[in-house]
Amino acid sequence: DIVMTQTPLSLSVTPGQPASISCKSSQSLLHSDGKTYLYWYLQKPGQSPQLLIYEVSNRFSGVPDRFSGSGSGTDFTLKISRVEAEDVGVYYCMQSIQLPYSFGQGTKLEIK
Amino acid sequence: EVQLVESGGGLVQPGRSLRLSCAASGFTFDDYAMHWVRQAPGKGLEWVSGISWNSGSIGYADSVKGRFTISRDNAKNSLYLQMNSLRAEDMALYYCAKAEGYDILTGGALQHWGQGTLVTVSS
């Protein structure tokens, strides 16, 4: 099974400052079809998870452009260029290249 | 607008069974794979099971294999999770999620999620 490891597990950021979350997979998420099956989700307090980024770097519909994703193979990063109050919650990476799908442990973002 | 509404959760004794349902609307249900993901109280997300558009591909987490059965009824736009031999560690909020594509193998994103239904396992 693929293990997803996120760092840090918590983050406290001043509004307007950047934030970065790392996600590492135990196996490459690059498939022979050319796609990399790495996704980022945000679970705001009391809400269901929502898709932010698909295939490493593509923003899902309605996601602000302050969110960006990068990486390849086994190392990935989610960046928020300027954190806003509405960005609080827990961020998860997820892989779907192989069953069982797996999530990182989550990174809790709070505002200073 | 995609809507996923889970139901069927509740309080159940260890060893008993429960069947969860997910009613889907706002998209062509039989074009997409569907999944169940759970979240134990205060914990992270755990993928539970997935089913392809035509039920031809099905997968389970090791933690539920042999006890849980996923199914779908495309005529009713509904997804199900039959949970047998429930354990304390199965207690969680269970989310239904719509996949990006039709299969669960290299399945893409879980694009849309319901609000979840809570399963409590306790004597």
Image: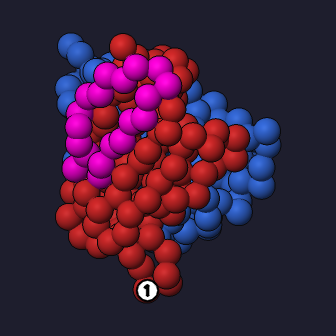
Residue annotated with mark 1: A32
**In the image, residue A16 lies in the stretch drawn in magenta:** yes
| In the rendered image, the vertical position of residue A37 relative to residue B86, given as above or below | below
Residue B112 picture location, percent across and down: 61, 43
A93 with respect to A34 (left or right) = left
Residue B90 vs residue A46, the one in the foreground: A46
**In the image, residue A87 lies in the stretch drawn in magenta:** no
Q: Which chain is red?
A: A
Residue B8 visible at all? no
| In the rendered image, the vertical position of residue A21 relative to residue A34, given as above or below | above
Main secondary structure type of the part rendered in magenta: strand
Label 1 residue SS: loop
Question: Which span is picked out in magenta?
Answer: A5-23
In the image as oriented, which residue stretches furthest toward the front?
A17
Residue in the picture at 33% in, 72% down: A73
Residue in the picture at 50% in, 39% down: A81
A68 with respect to A38 (left or right) = right
Quarter placement of the C terminus of chain A:
top left
Residue A103 vs residue A52, the one in the foreground: A52
**Total count of labels:** 1
